[in-house]
Image (tube, helix red, strand yellow):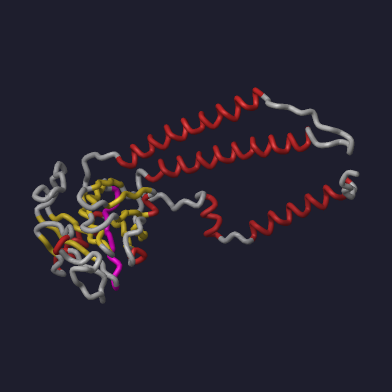
Amino acid sequence: MGLQVPKIAGAPARRVLRVAVLGAAMLVLAGCSEADQHQIKNLAMPDRITEQGPYTYELWKWAWVAAMITGVIVWGLIFYAVVKFRRRSDDEVPRQTRYNLPLEVFYTIAPVLMCIVFFFHTVRVQDIQTELSTPDVTVEVTGQQWSWTFNHGVGEENPDATGEPGDYAYGSYVYTSGDGSEIPTLVLPVDQRIQFNLRSPDVIHNFGVPSFLTRMDVIPGRINKLQVTPTVEGDYVGKCYELCGVYHSRMLFKVKVVSQEEYEQYKSDLADAGNTAEQPLIGGADTTTQAGLAEDDNQEGSQE
């Protein structure tokens, strides 16, 4: 005996279902705040504030489109099979099919083509995000356990400088450095192509600002270079995206994008406060550790 399912009148059932779906949709939309609606519009991505950011967003957006198309096709095939090959009587035995050549060719070729397209566009966006050209401003960034040091150049810039010791972009620097009790602020001029020379004196960190829609590892023993062009003034946040030790969660920093005049004034204020150096602070004896911790040779991230 087959499974007996109670039957529901067609028209009333459809009306009830339609009202239920409409009510659920209205409830969901009503529960979305303005911030939630903004996140939905951005597909859960931050607002883009750099010249390079929209490329990452477009890649993310079209990945969603491809995923939805794939989902619709798969759901369509599932519902088609459910309706087309449903059992129509208790005594019916479905026709046994070993394979369907067109379908097997489709679900073999289609994923391969999707991977090729995704790979191509991912590499294209990656090349844009990591492209290096002549910078307008160079900032020497040191990620140390467990905070950040930002070195801003003073005077004429040498755009051909490698950033290696003895070949810095500026003749002198002003700096700001954070610790366990103070989160440092990275101040940047708007509409300027900024190069970050990223260094670490201890372990691998990762320099990232969500609104930049890009980030890069900070690796001991080498200089990684990242360039962005901020286009929107405002206050943002950044952090380390690499698990770097017990106080990794405190490796935060603020980002403030300002006008060129405000940027010059900021550097002047740092100089007046005595935060000056002939060369950028890049670690070693210049590295400070978590405030309140006794420093010794066995401490992770201690001064050399």
User: Which region shows up in magenta?
Assistant: 181-191
Q: Residue at x 26, y 69 (%)?
A: 179
Q: In this view of the protein, which residue sits in the foreground, 6 or 130?
A: 6
- In the rendered image, which quarter contains the C terminus? bottom left
State which quarter of the image contains the N terminus.
top right
Identify the residue at horizontal 22%, vertical 62% (top origin). Answer: 266
153 sits to left or right of 110: left
Q: Residue at x 33, y 66 (%)?
A: 246
Residue 286 locus on image (x, y percent): 15, 63
Q: Indicate yes or no whether the magenta region holds residue 176.
A: no
How many marks do you count on the picture? 0
Q: Quadrant of residue 298?
A: bottom left
What is the quadrant of residue 254 in the picture?
A: bottom left
> How far across and down, in percent of the image, does residue 234 sit?
35, 58
Residue in the image at 32% along x and 49% along y: 216
**Left or right relative to 87: residue 155:** left
Residue lying farthest top? 101
| 126 over 153 or under it: above or below | above
Residue 114, percent across and down? 51, 32
Residue 74, position as x, y percentages in the image: 64, 37
Question: Can the viewer see residue 266 in this picture?
Answer: yes
Q: Is residue 261 visible?
A: no
